[in-house]
Image (spheres, rainbow, N blue to C red):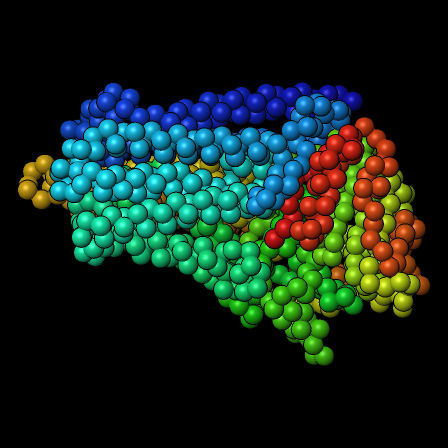
């Protein structure tokens, strides 16, 4: 009892520190937003900017330094303290079940709405989208007011008519407004982000924000380019399109960047992405060239506002590259009769991850460039040495992989690289009395991980778990074999442990009116990993978030030091001591080079420092022969009906199968008892929208729709 009190006191202290970190992050972020708000106004240009630039004669970065620090440092500071926040939260026990009651007003804000073309959004998301639109409108209006205040003088300087000059300035302002969208666009796709968890978000669940911002940015950048071409045509200056000014804006670089952006934009529309996913996937690699030419076009000065998000994305991208260079140890697979299979990898015991985490897989023999996300279905507490994913054949890549595994002479080893796992910083399933999970097809995979987590909690922690109602919807009865994978591969829980979990499974088969042949048991397949294959582990071990904070800090200090040297000894002497001006595009290239150098040096040093420790942990895992033997025994045991375990008997008794119909979701949800019912939906878009519409209709007051998207 004393240990429990100490744990609660320690948890309380950590919560207080986390609350202080959140408050500090909020203050810094609001200050940064205020900088965005006042930047396009007269106040900024007439009052604050002269003070910021007062020390430019000291050669400290010239004009670039103060502006960059104002926009970049606050966000990177939030990222660093966010890493500390997540690290402190990792060791806190899950005590959320003690406070299941949620404020009515918060439940109302979390209710889903179907808004075209945004899809499923909560009122909280509607509020923040509205605030972002207001910011963009303010930014646009304030800049237009400032630019048009001296439009007559500008027209005389350019030698054009006033109405033509207005088109010129309007095009500029639209481009600057597009920078706001670009500034936020990289945060959702930064998988190891320390900023998203501060907002209770994950990268997977934030992809829709990336899509919204991408459409907005490209619409504004397209209008920006079109208006400039129109201005040049009307003023008989089309030769400006071929201009690469070394001391100002480079038009050619902007045009190249726009063409690259349009290529990505056209292939990213849903109709194109679904029909030609590989085309969408490969063209999205053009983002590298797009960003290079964008910075060459604007110069590093105008790119400062979007630099923090892109900087954090580059760190994440390089860390993913380091992790993906290693081949992981694939030890077994299980083939199901419904063209679905499970892959089991060896894992370092110290690697912990949350349910609903995802992992990106690459099989070089199929494609060296394609990475596909899959939900991790294993549980890190119950399956300490293995990590599993379930894959259904739904595209050319997964079909090729299934053909390799199901061939008459299957391969004895398969080279696989991974990135991840990535998941929520914490989960709060225990705050509900009932958890309803509705899935269509392969959408059941995230729910397998949730069920295993609840089984683990009921067996290892003295906490009451909510009732689980799983409603999987399949086309044919062969897909029922997926339910055989609900229990962990290690099969450690006893029958009494599983009976502690109140689980009800209502399976619906839509294309069969009666029970057919009993689905075959999963077919085991074992591999012989190579000696060079390594278990899946965190790239920096258990203190990975602290290492990420160190990398962000160190890389930025390296970058600032190199830029200071550049300006002190090269830029300032040339700009002030000769008649020449240091070329803008050269400044931009050197800044990009310094950013990459700082990230590579700091991240590589941290990786090499931890590499020996990770290698020592790998030696503690069973050797290849023992692992293969152990897995083979387990798979054979699971396939033997005569030795079928009691846990499996307990689970099969909870399954009710309905043939030839679909579930009446409205009736099911309205009949759910309990003060708090959490509803999850995963699978086809229509299914998720139907469930969200029921939860948001107000007919069921005790239901909370969980915003996890699971829509890769």
At horizontal 7% and vertical 38% (from top left) the residue drawn is: 577
**Residue 275 shown left or right of residue 50 in the figure:** right
Q: Is residue 432 visible?
A: no
**Residue 115 shown left or right of residue 296 in the figure:** right
Which quarter of the picture shows residue 146? top left
**Residue 10 percent across, percent down from the top left:** 65, 23
**Residue 680 percent across, percent down from the top left:** 73, 42
At horizontal 57% and vertical 25% (from top left) the residue drawn is: 18
Nearer-the-camera pick, 312 or 346: 312
**Residue 261 shown left or right of residue 441 in the figure:** left
- Image position of 367 with respect to 562: above or below: below
**Residue 376 shown left or right of residue 480 in the figure:** left
- Image position of 447 with respect to 512: above or below: above
At horizontal 18% and vertical 41% (from top left) the residue drawn is: 161
**Residue 332 percent across, percent down from the top left:** 70, 64
Residue placed farthest to the bottom in the image?
408
Nearer-the-camera pick, 673 or 309: 673
**Residue 666 percent across, percent down from the top left:** 81, 42
């Amino acid at each position: 009892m004393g240990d429990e009190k100490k744990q609660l006191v320690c948890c309380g202290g950590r919560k207080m520190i986390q609350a202080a970190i959140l408050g500090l992050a909020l203050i810094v972020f609001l200050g940064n937003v205020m900088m965005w708000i006042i930047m396009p106004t007269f106040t900024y240009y007439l009052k604050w900017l002269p003070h910021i630039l007062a020390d430019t004669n000291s050669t400290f970065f010239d004009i670039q330094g103060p502006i960059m620090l104002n926009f970049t440092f606050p966000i990177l500071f939030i990222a660093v303290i966010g890493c500390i926040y997540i690290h402190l939260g990792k060791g806190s026990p899950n005590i959320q079940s003690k406070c299941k009651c949620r404020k009515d007003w918060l439940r109302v804000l979390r209710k889903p709405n179907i808004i075209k073309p945004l899809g499923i959004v909560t009122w909280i998301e509607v509020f923040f989208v509205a605030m972002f639109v207001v910011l963009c409108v303010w930014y646009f209006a304030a800049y237009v007011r400032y630019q048009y205040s001296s439009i007559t003088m500008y027209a005389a300087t350019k030698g054009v008519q006033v109405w033509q000059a207005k088109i010129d300035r309007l095009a500029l302002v639209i481009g600057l407004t597009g920078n706001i969208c670009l500034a936020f666009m990289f945060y959702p796709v930064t998988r190891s982000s320390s900023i998203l968890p501060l907002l209770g978000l994950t990268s997977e669940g934030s992809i829709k924000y990336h899509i919204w911002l991408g459409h907005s940015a490209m619409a504004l950048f397209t209008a920006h380019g079109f208006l400039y071409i129109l201005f040049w045509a009307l003023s008989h200056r089309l030769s400006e399109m071929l201009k690469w000014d070394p001391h100002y804006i480079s038009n050619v670089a902007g045009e190249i960047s726009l063409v690259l952006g349009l290529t990505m934009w056209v292939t990213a529309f849903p109709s194109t992405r679904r029909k030609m996913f590989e085309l969408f996937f490969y063209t999205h690699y053009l983002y590298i060239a797009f960003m290079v030419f964008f910075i060459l076009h604007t110069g590093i000065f105008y790119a400062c506002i979007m630099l923090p998000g892109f900087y954090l994305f580059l760190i994440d991208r390089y860390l993913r590259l380091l992790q993906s260079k290693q081949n992981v140890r694939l030890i077994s697979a299980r083939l199901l009769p419904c063209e679905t299979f499970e892959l089991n990898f060896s894992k370092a015991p110290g690697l912990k991850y949350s349910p609903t985490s995802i992992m990106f897989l690459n099989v070089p023999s199929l494609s060296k460039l394609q990475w596909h996300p899959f939900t991790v279905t294993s549980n890190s507490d119950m399956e300490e040495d293995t990590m599993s994913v379930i894959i259904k054949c739904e595209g050319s890549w997964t079909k090729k992989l299934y053909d390799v595994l199901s061939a008459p002479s299957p391969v004895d080893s398969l080279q696989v690289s991974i990135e991840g796992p990535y998941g929520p910083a914490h989960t709060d399933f225990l705050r509900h009395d009932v958890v309803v999970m509705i899935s269509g097809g392969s959408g059941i995979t995230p729910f397998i991980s949730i069920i295993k987590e609840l089984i683990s909690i009921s067996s290892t922690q003295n906490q009451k778990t909510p009732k689980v109602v799983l409603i999987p919807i399949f086309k044919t009865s062969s897909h029922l074999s997926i339910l055989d994978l609900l229990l962990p591969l290690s099969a450690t829980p006893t029958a009494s442990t599983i009976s502690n979990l109140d689980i009800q499974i209502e399976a619906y088969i839509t294309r069969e009116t009666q029970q057919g042949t009993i689905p075959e048991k999963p077919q085991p397949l074992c591999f012989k990993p190579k000696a060079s294959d390594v278990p899946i582990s965190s790239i920096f071990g258990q203190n990975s978030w602290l290492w990420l904070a160190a990398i962000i800090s160190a890389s930025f200090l390296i970058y600032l030091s190199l830029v200071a040297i550049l300006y002190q000894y090269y830029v300032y002497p040339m700009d002030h001591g000769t008649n020449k001006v240091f070329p803008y595009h050269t400044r931009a290239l050197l800044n990009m080079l310094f950013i990459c150098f700082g990230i590579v040096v700091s991240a590589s040093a941290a990786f090499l420092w931890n590499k020996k420790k990770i290698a020592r942990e790998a030696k503690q895992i069973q050797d290849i022969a023992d692992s293969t033997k152990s897995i083979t025994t387990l798979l054979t045991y699971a396939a033997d009906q005569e030795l079928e375990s009691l846990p499996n008997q307990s689970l099969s008794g909870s399954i009710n199968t309905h043939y030839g119909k679909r579930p009446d979701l409205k009736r099911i949800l309205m009949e759910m008892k309990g003060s708090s019912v959490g509803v999850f939906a995963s699978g086809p878009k229509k299914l998720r929208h139907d469930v969200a519409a029921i939860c948001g209709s107000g007919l069921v007051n005790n239901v909370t729709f969980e915003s996890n998207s699971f829509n890769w």
